[in-house]
Image (cartoon, helix red, strand yellow):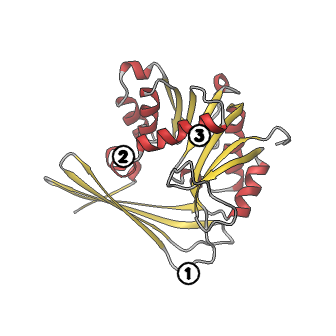
Amino acid sequence: MERRKDWYEHPEYYEAIFGTDTVREADFLQELSRRFGTGGNQWLEPACGAGRLVEEAARRGLKVAGYDLSEAMLAHARKRLTPAERRRVKLSQARMEDFFDPALEGRVDLAHTLVSTFRYLDSEKAAVEHLTGTRRLLKPDGIYVLGFHLTDYARSGPEHERWVGQVGADKVVCNTHEGLPEQRLRRSPMRNRLRVTGPDKDWLIETTWYFRTYDEAQVKRLFRKSGLRVTATFDFDYDLDSPVGRGSPRLDRVFVLKPDTSSKA
C-alpha cells in the first residue's frame, strides 16, 4: 500500500465522493435564489474545489465566478469546462478570507459554500473577513447560501462518516472522523482517509486538520457581526418544503443569508 497526503492534490478522487449530489444541489440553489433572492444569473462559489458546481451552473447558462486555494483543484475545474462554458466562468486562486473582485462588487445574485468548507476558517477574524467580503459582492437582495455542521459541545464520542465512490476501474472509500470538540479553543480535530484501490493501485491518502466549531448562538453572533441576516434555514436533505425550525436538534444547517441593510458592519 502506498501512502499519500492531502486529498486536495487528487481532485478526481475527491470528486468521486462529493460529486454525487451535484444536480440536486444546483436545483436547490436555483430555487433558493428564486424564492429568497433575485433569481439572477451571476453566481459566486468560494472554495469551488474541483469545479463540479461551477460546471453545472455554467451548463445551465449562468455566469460563474469561483475561487479556491488549491491550484490542483482549479486546474481540474478548468479542464472540465467546454469552450462555451469557459466564456461564462472566471476562476481565481485565493483564500476565502482574502478574495475580492471589484468587478463583482454589488453584482452577485447568489454565492454558495456547502459541505462545511466554511469551517476551515480557523479564527473569528478570518470568518468575519470572509463573510463581510462576500457580503460586499452581493446585490442588496442577493443571497449567500452557507452550509456546515454546528457543534454539540456536550457530545462524548467522535463522529464518523463513510462514502464509497468509483473513478473508472478504481474504487474509492472515504472515511472522515471528527474528534471531540475543544470548546475553549473553538476547534475539532479532523482526519480523512481516502482508500483508492484498482488495477496496479493501492493508495491510502490521509489528511488531518482542525475545523472551527460553532454552536447556534455563536454562529448567529458571527452573522450579525458580519452584517448578514438569516432569511431561512434548511438541512443537508435540501428539502425546500422542510425548513429547519427553532430548537431543531439537527446540526447540519444550510443558512440563507442576506445583507442586513441596518448593520454598520
77 relative to 249 in the view: left or right? left
Amino acid at circle 2: Glu
Q: Which residue appears at 74% of the width and 45% of the height?
A: 228
In the displayed orientation, state which residue is furthest to the bottom.
Answer: 156
* x, y percent for residue 214: 65, 62
**Quadrant where the C terminus lies?**
top right
In space, the residues marked 1 and 3 are separated at their CA atoms by: 36 Å
* x, y percent for residue 229: 75, 46
Viewer-closest of 177 and 247: 247
| Badge 1 or badge 3: first in the primary sequence | 3
- Which residue is the site of mark 1? 156
Q: Nearer the viewer, mark 1 or mark 3?
A: 3
Q: Height in image: 78 above or below 20?
A: above
The tag on residue 32 is 3
* x, y percent for residue 246: 70, 62
- Which residue is the site of mark 2? 15
Q: Which residue appears at 64% of the width and 41% of the height?
A: 144
In space, the residues marked 3 and 2 are separated at their CA atoms by: 24 Å
Q: Nearer the viewer, mark 3 or mark 2?
A: 3
Viewer-closest of 208 and 165: 165
In the displayed orientation, state which residue is furthest to the front.
Answer: 241
In space, the residues marked 1 and 2 are separated at their CA atoms by: 31 Å
**Tag 1 secondary structure:** loop
The tag on residue 201 is none
The answer, for residue 95, to whether it is visible in the render is no
